[in-house]
């Protein structure tokens, strides 16, 4: 890692005195050194240079550059993957039509109707945990809550264990960097989703009234969604969100345990809980990157990004940019809210943000309301998560 940073500084010094475009600095984001400290590495990389290139693509580290790219879909296209992903891989004008069809699933009225069942799930999970013994916030709270909440919302009751097993397989496959293995895991998840779609088609008018069934009658540009697009939408709502929600729970639980003053303040008054959670996630954003591809050459400081380059918008780094967050580890929810990128920016800002926020608020309300204290356990090891997620893989807690 030191060699990478020294090389970046050298390039920086050279290019500042040059009138020609500088070579983009190199790095390896999946090296052992980087994976051992992703967030710290991003901080150091951002301080050294606004971007860096690896065989995977070019990473943007600064808040302004990430926001500019996210808000310029004509130049930074989302059509990156060989596989169609709705709506993540869609560009305008197609994206707008699909987004308009998806947004109604996350209205305030729908979230309000869902809240009681989410509260029940959270209370059952927190209530079943032992007091005074070590528990893991990620695997014993985050994972089961994410799976049960999504299964309840989508009407996938009865397959929670199957989803938990898939999450474990998916994590292992992703970390293996074996494309055939990750493809097999992705195909397995598509089959899980297709089984739910086929079941509802077979049931006809007797199908349960849930978002999965509702998708079968959604139209875009006057045509019903294809099964492939339905599966893609449901995959987007689940495959990524399950792990992301578990990681977010881990980040928030760690922050509360490590900051008893914030914990007690929120325990006494939870009115600002949603904003507080957003700020905790900004400080340690578990949603690392989104991908784009350039459609034209893009100048950036003294560098030029060529057309056809794969781009990584590094949300974790952008959310800690000192030009906006003077001390990025300082907890200031109101002051930092306007620049918080936890849920992205631009046309692809997360459509499921209302649901994610509701789930996290409900989970934390249960955690605070059903305990008198949350502490980091001294007999367990804190373990950081690695790409494609950030945050924590393991957060040992003691609940009182």
Image (cartoon, grey):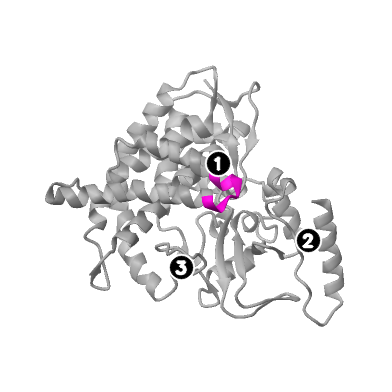
Under tag 3, what secondary structure? helix
Does the stretch in magenta take in 340? no
Q: Is tag 1's residue or tag 3's residue first in the polypeptide sequence? A: 1
Expressed as whole percent of the image width and height from the top left, the position of residue 105 reads 31, 55
Under tag 1, what secondary structure? helix
Expressed as whole percent of the image width and height from the top left, the position of residue 139 reads 50, 32
Under tag 2, what secondary structure? helix
Camera sees residue 363: no
Does the stretch in magenta take in 175? yes
**Label 2: how many Cα within 10 Å (few below 14, some 14–19, many 20+):** some
Identify the magenta region.
173-180
**Label 3: how many Cα within 10 Å (few below 14, some 14–19, many 20+):** some
Reading the image, the residue beneath label 3 is: 347
Q: Would you identify the image quadrant in which residue 317 lies? A: bottom right
Reading the image, the residue beneath label 2 is: 48
Position of 91 with respect to 49 (left or right) is left
Residue name at image x 58 percent, y 66 percent: 67
| Main SS of residues in magenta | helix
> Up-down: is 177 above or below 366?
below
Q: Distance between the residues labelled 2 and 3?
A: 29 Å
Reading the image, the residue beneath label 1 is: 172
């Amino acid at each position: 890692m030191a060699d990478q940073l020294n090389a970046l500084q050298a390039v920086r010094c050279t290019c500042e005195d040059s009138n020609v475009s500088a070579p983009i600095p190199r790095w390896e984001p999946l090296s052992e050194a980087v994976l051992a400290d992703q967030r710290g590495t991003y901080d150091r990389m951002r301080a050294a240079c606004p971007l860096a290139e690896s065989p995977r693509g070019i990473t943007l580290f600064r808040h302004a550059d990430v926001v500019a790219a996210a808000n310029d879909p004509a130049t930074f296209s989302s059509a990156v993957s060989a596989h169609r992903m709705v709506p993540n891989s869609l560009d305008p004008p197609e994206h707008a039509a699909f987004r308009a069809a998806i947004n109604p699933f996350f209205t305030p009225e729908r979230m309000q109707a869902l809240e009681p069942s989410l509260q029940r799930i959270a209370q059952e999970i927190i209530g079943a945990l032992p007091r005074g013994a070590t528990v893991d916030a990620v695997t014993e709270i985050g994972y089961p809550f994410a799976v049960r909440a999504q299964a309840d919302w989508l009407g996938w009751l009865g397959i929670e264990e199957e989803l938990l097993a898939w999450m474990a397989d998916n994590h292992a496959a992703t970390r293996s960097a074996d494309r055939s293995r990750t493809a097999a895991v992705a195909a397995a998840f598509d089959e899980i989703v297709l089984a739910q779609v086929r079941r509802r088609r077979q049931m006809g008018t007797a199908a349960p009234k849930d978002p999965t069934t509702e998708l079968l009658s959604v139209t875009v540009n006057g045509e019903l969604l294809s099964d492939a697009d339905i599966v893609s939408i449901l995959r987007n709502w689940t495959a990524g969100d399950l792990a992301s929600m578990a990681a977010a729970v881990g980040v928030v639980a760690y922050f509360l345990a490590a900051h008893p003053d914030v914990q007690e303040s929120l325990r006494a008054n939870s009115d600002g809980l949603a904003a507080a959670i957003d700020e905790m996630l900004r400080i340690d954003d578990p949603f690392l990157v989104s991908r784009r591809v350039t459609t034209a050459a893009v100048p950036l400081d003294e560098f030029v990004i060529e057309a056809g380059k794969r781009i990584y918008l590094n949300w974790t780094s952008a959310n800690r940019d000192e030009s906006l967050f003077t001390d990025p580890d300082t907890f200031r929810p109101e002051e930092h809210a306007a620049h918080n990128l936890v849920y992205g920016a631009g046309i692809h800002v997360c459509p499921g943000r209302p649901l994610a926020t509701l789930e996290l608020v409900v989970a934390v309300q249960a955690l605070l309301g059903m305990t008198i204290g949350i502490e980091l356990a001294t007999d367990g090891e804190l373990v950081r998560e690695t790409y494609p997620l950030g945050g924590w893989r393991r957060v040992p807690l003691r609940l009182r």
